[in-house]
Image (cartoon, rainbow, N blue to C red):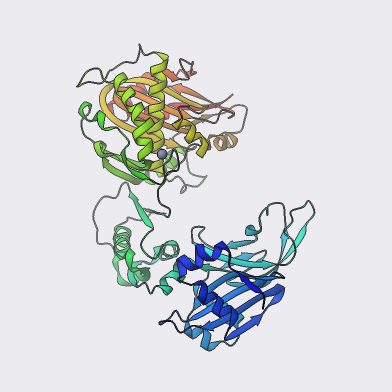
Amino acid sequence: MTKLFLGNEFNDVFESNFSITEDEVCETYNNPDLVQELKIGVKLSIKKLNKEGHRSNLLLCVQDKGDYSLFIFSYWIPEEAVISFAEPLSILQNFVATFGCRIRVGCTEDFFITEATVALKHSLKHPDQVIQVVGSEHVPCQYYFFHNNEFIVSDTLVFLDVYYAFSVNNNKYTSWLYKLTEVGVKVPKEWYNRLSDLVEVLEPNGKTQLKILRPKHNLSIHETSEKEKLEDFIEISVPEKYRHQFNYISNVLTSLKPNEKIVIVPSFSAPKCLFCDSKNVSKEHIFPKWLKPFLDKKIFNSTIYLNDSYDESTSYDEKLLSLFQSGVEGHKENSHGYTTQTVCRQCNNTWMSNIENKAKAILAADDERLISSLAHINKDDANILSRWLLKISLLLADKITYYRVFSVNEYKNIKAGYIPNGVIVEVAYSESYSLNFVVNHGANLLVQIGAKKISIDKAKKLAESYFVTSIQIGKLLFRVSYLPPSSLLLRKASLKRTETLYPWKVDLPFHELDTGEEIWSGSVSDGLELHMFNFSMILVDR
Ligand SMILES: [Zn+2]
């Protein structure tokens, strides 16, 4: 018998996650109870190893590589699957029907695909792209397939024969393997499918964090409505660790008014530092603690606009209304404790605290008031303030919209002291004295786009990478915006004249409006000054 080669995959996946030892694999390989040789050297073996309870039958797959056998996978198989089927391939198929996800290979879609042919087009650049898991991209799957001919990408169409393709949903398998209990939670029928998709992606031990974003305009508690008839509910099974969260979600859903929605955002990986990828993150203040004595405490109440619900035929006013109504509440937090989890200790204690000290020295007029004008600021200080504001804007964008404005490298450059090309930082002055912010990214209805040379559709497409944040600190209104330097669009200020801090003293075009002052003073008296300031930047073509 040829030697068995285990490889790193065995230790990383099967030994550490699925409690399978090297001895158990070797025993199954050397003395199997059942064995079946399949096409292209694939061999399945099954061995009853008499371990406790449901971890007794091990299924092993190896592939013959000439002078050795390569370990491919091994799984503990439920006893009933082994009893009812005689052949290892049928046992594997039965196992996959229970723990797998539907997959697609070429034009074939199923849980287990015994044989299929895939046309390798240009778009397929890696063998992994041959197999697609159907459904949520977040379902943590292990997937397997075999092919006998070479994987080549060429100008002419090449065909690849694929055998025994399937995937295993790690969550379902782990739940069974470690006997994790599930509980039933009653949820409104119309949400069943969406919540089922969500359950599929949950890490069964409770490690998946769920952020629930609620409708902005529905803050009333649980109203009795027609919806609450029992037949409108259906039970969904969720891992026990998520019982409370799903009960809460169900309550929120029950109290929704017609057409209102919530967004549930699962987060899977441990948070990493935005600026250096370190996992050693801690809770850090977005608005620094040194600002505390200068500003009254207030409650931030951010909104996320989901502008996907209106159709093209409705009027602009209706669209705008629908956009505002689609707002879901992001976070409601005290400004003095407004924190992020995406900054590491190292960054916080080095370059960030360094900028904080410098920003404080520039902005604090005395121990009680912040300065109210930057008319006499010099270039170096303007640069420091711009970096400081950019840092705050990026943390806000990440916290509120989960949006990353720049590439990983550019975040690292910001840490090193650079401001990416395409960033503009401006300042204007307010009548009020406050702490507040507005964040926007992409081309939504709140961004005014004027294009003459290119189509408005193209301009909107170009504006997708547009990012703008306005921050009021005391009397100072700051606006940090970004467009890729190569963009065909230009930024123009309107309504309120600004001074540019970065790039230093650059002239930003200003769009004069006859009614500009009127609109501006209206927004000031409505308390929408900062919103208006943020959205008074117009995008035009060059
Ligand atoms: Zn860091």
Measuring from the top left, give residue 6's x and y in whole percent. Answer: 58, 68
- Whether residue 34 sits left or right of residue 328 in the image: it is right
Q: Quadrant of residue 71?
A: bottom right
Residue at image location 52% in from the left, 88% down from the top? 83
Q: Quadrant of residue 388?
A: top left
Along the viewing direction, whichever of 43 and 386 lies nearer the viewer: 43
- Residue, far top: 376
- Whether residue 484 sits left or right of residue 297 in the image: it is right
Residue at image location 45% in from the left, 84% down from the top? 50
Q: Report if residue 515 is visible in the image.
A: no
Residue at image location 31% in from the left, 66% down from the top? 243
The quadrant of the rendering that contains the N terminus is bottom right
Q: Quadrant of ligand 1?
A: top left
Measuring from the top left, give residue 238's x and y in whole percent. Answer: 37, 68
Q: Is residue 96 above or below residue 521?
A: below
- Whether residue 542 sits left or right of residue 119 in the image: it is left
The quadrant of the rendering that contains the C terminus is top right
Q: Report if residue 8 is visible in the image.
A: yes
Along the viewing direction, whichever of 17 and 101 lies nearer the viewer: 17
Along the viewing direction, whichever of 493 and 487 lies nearer the viewer: 487
- Whether residue 91 sits left or right of residue 520 in the image: it is right
Measuring from the top left, give residue 528's x and y in whole percent. Answer: 32, 30
Measuring from the top left, give residue 171's x and y in whole percent. Answer: 45, 66
